[in-house]
Image (cartoon, rainbow, N blue to C red):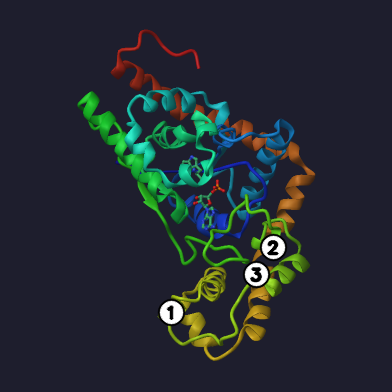
Amino acid sequence: MMSRIFSGIQPTGNLHLGNYLGAIRNWVDLQHQFESIYCVVDLHAITVPQNPAALHQATIEVTASLLAAGIDPKQAIIFNQSRVPQHAELAWIFNCVARLGWLNRMTQFKEKAGKNRENASVGLFAYPALMAADILAYKATHVPVGEDQKQHLELTRDIAGAFNAMVEEDFFPLPEPQIIGEATRVMSLRDGTSKMSKSDASDFSRINMNDDADTIVQKIRKAKTDPDVLPETAEALDDRPEARNLVTIYAALAGTDIDRVLAEYAGQGFGQFKPALADLAVAKLEPVTQAMRRYMDDTAEVIKVLDDGAERAHAIAQPIMSDIRKRLGFLGESLG
Ligand code: AMP
Ligand code: TRP
């Protein structure tokens, strides 16, 4: 079967270094090797309350970041999810394929719903079925994501398998997660045991893709660390989550691995390592930040990319959805 890449990102808040190293950088590399579809998932965003003006703006900003990071809209398809109605249509069908028990196991729902579970939206609970629909509406075979999406990808495979069994045909591929690189789980700069995230209240917990050089330097200077020097082996970082995180970020930005970073910096303290990391981060992120500012000065171009992407995505998803409707016995063609 032909390979096809699909991945998604939510238009909520600033993109950060975790998004970049865990996902977007890999998307940039993969677009040259495979047909690639990258989706700004606005339907996923509204599983929690959103301000419409902010959602609109964030959709443009996230798209600008993808372009600034090097995704080429002539090569890859970039679009926002709600424009291609097949996502929502297939998600409903998958709501009827997925079992309550499968969704009950999803750790992201438990984290996001928190203590107030009774008050979470039904959409937040069904979120992984929509994600499965995103991927399978294109019969995508490979899904580059950060570590935190692994469980959702397993559910996607379960849904694809259950659907195939139901229609007695290998209709959908079982998509493979691609969790690539040194930094598949970038941690908060304030707490090495929690994930770097858009929703963390402290802006000092993350490096945003639109932070200027001074801000990046300051955030790294203030990052939580320990008083010890860097060790010689990666294992010695196991019980030093903050130190491990900074070394991992360095390795990922430099395009090397943890062992090689330690070979260079073993015996040095954070007084020496942090400035080196800050220099590297600024050197790697500054060109992306600058490109992003240029795109934000000309949002008409960004919107054109999304228009064009939506049409190309729709042209792929529509005939697949039509086949699905036939398999299920739905009468007539969808008007979407
Ligand atoms: P989200 O911002 O939740 O829409 O995530 C978009 C992509 O970034 C997904 O592939 C995530 O797995 C990835 N991602 C988000 N946070 C991190 C992180 N802290 N480390 C690595 N990858 C991440
Ligand atoms: N759930 C993903 C996240 O929060 C975003 C996403 C939505 C996605 N649909 C997808 C990722 C399809 C990969 C494939 O990061």
Residue positioned 56% across, 34% down in the render: 47
- Image vertical order of residue 33 relative to residue 304, above or below: below
User: Label 1 sits on what residue type?
Assistant: Ala
Q: Nearer the viewer, residue 147 or 212?
A: 147
Q: Residues within 10 Å of mark 1 (few under 14, many from 20)?
A: some
Q: Which badge, 3 or 2, is on the more N-terminal residue?
A: 2
User: Label 2 sits on what residue type?
Assistant: Phe
User: Label 3 sits on what residue type?
Assistant: Ala
Considering every residue shown, the one lying at the far top of the view is 331
- Image vertical order of residue 265 relative to residue 186, above or below: below
Specify the quadrant of the image occupied by residue 58: top right
Residue at the spot of label 2: 204
Asked if labels 2 and 3 touch by Cβ distance under 8 angstroms, the answer is no
Marks 3/2: CA–CA distance: 15 Å
Marks 1/3: CA–CA distance: 21 Å
The label shown at residue 234 is: 1
Residue at the spot of label 3: 281
Q: Nearer the viewer, residue 258 or 300?
A: 258
Residue 291 position within the rendered picture, expressed as x and y whole percent measured from the top left: 71, 54
Q: Name the element at disc 3.
A: helix
Ligand 1 within 8 Å, label 1 CB: no
Q: Which badge, 1 or 3, is on the more N-terminal residue?
A: 1
- 3 vs 2, front mark: 2
- 1 vs 3, front mark: 1
